[in-house]
Amino acid sequence: MQRIYEDYAYSDEARAECIWPLPDRAWPSVEGELTTEVAIVGGGYTGLSAALHLAQEGVSCTVLEAHVPGWGASGRNGGFCMGGGDKAGPSAIARRFGETAARTYFQTQKASVDLVAQILDTHGIDADTHSKGELLLAHRPQAVAALHQEADDWTSLGETPRFIPKSALCDEGMGGNFHAGLVLPLGFALNPGKYVSGLAEAADNAGADIYTNSPVKNIGQENGRYVLTTPKGLVTARKLIMATNGYSSDDLPNWLRGRYLPVQSNIIVTRPLTDDEIAQQGWHTDFMAYDSRNLLHYFRLLPDRRFLLGMRGNIAATPTKQDDMRARTARDLAQMFPAWKKVETPYFWSGLISMSRDLLPYIGPLGGLGNAWAGMNYHGNGVSVATWAGQQLARMAMGQPAGSDVHASPLARFPFAGLRRSYLRPAFWAYRLKDGPAP
């Protein structure tokens, strides 16, 4: 396999301290030869959602997962089910595609959040949901103007964001070193492990075949069909969906080479906080929140009173670099929430998000292969968007209209694809300089 990080990024060690549970059941592995209508590579939100929606329509489909469902980013993210999926922003999308396409794209974001809520309700998945909307916080005075611009962008799309001045943050339980807040009324928080476990069970109950510990080693074509090779067997399919996102390989298939850029994201979680500790810091809101940095922090108070904080910035994936990132994340937690600087943080893990060259998600054809599609590059906001992408990929596989002009924008390669991880070093340094130190 041709991947851009060290082996550590793709190992169990990177998620060893993850607090979210993975599906607690035995799944079969591929042995011998199997035949299916649609082969789906990847058992995260995208692949499992595609399988669920195909199976519900009576379409034979097979999920091939290298580990267990949710082992990758779907089972180790911050649990922010919100709009997004892009890094470009509403204004940039409107300039490139026009106001109508931008509005359509925004409607798909709302639809993606609604789809997750529907799946939770329909299939009785208890995913510890909370937070009605999301909270954006200005990390320094100069960022307050950007919050007003963000509010204008959302208002133009028909939403009603709520601006919170610095003087009112503490009254709303948002005590910390912040200078203003903006509540965006879209989305909710959840336990990603419980959600992906429930999604896997729902797909299985609908009739999808889910195989674990079955990494795809090669994808070939014979007599108009795809032949996927795993360590102990072969799967033959008329159609193919790739749903591996940041855990993709440049040679599976070759068309993917350089069309995605995995980026490490890291999460630290405290022990349960006492009432006194929460009162001392003044942070008791249950909003899922993030700050205005380019290398943003994302954080929320969990239902069991643990506090979660995530951030990015690691270039290499080794145990030593993981330790360094843990120390940096703990340091930022202490600087942002000083009352908690001595609180123990027993959980820390990392995972891979994925970015595209044009900072947009992609849901569309897999090159010129025919009867093959991919959903990927959600820029760290994949809980809802990946679920919706799976639904759209299922529709594409059934020959139905799906996606949008924004999602189907050609997926360009990064220049000098083999060196693309090296782009992150100057970018991260520039972002840190622009962001300034944690308060």
Image: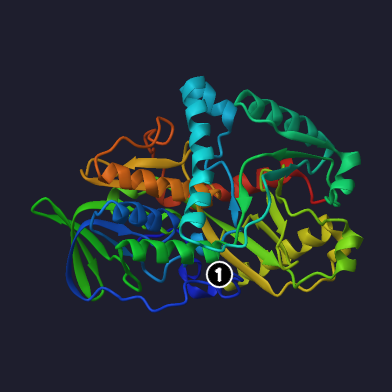
Q: Secondary structure at mark 1?
A: loop
181 left or right, relative to 74: right
In the picture of the structure, the residue carrying the numbered disc 1 is: 318
Q: Residue 329 sits in which quadrant? A: bottom right
Q: Position of residue 400 (x, y in %)?
A: 28, 38
Q: Position of residue 295 (x, y in %)?
A: 66, 48
Q: Is residue 234 visible?
A: yes
- For the N terminus, the quadrant is bottom left
Question: What residue is shown at x 44% (from left), y 46% (from top)?
Answer: 388
The amino acid sitting under disc 1 is Thr
Name above or below for residue 269 compared with residue 370. Answer: below
Between 384 and 214, the one nearer to me in the picture: 384
Name above or below for residue 414 compared with residue 202. Answer: above
Name above or below for residue 298 compared with residue 71. Answer: above
Question: What residue is shown at x 34% (from left), y 40% (from top)?
Answer: 364
Q: Position of residue 105 (x, y in %)?
A: 49, 32
331 left or right, relative to 417: right
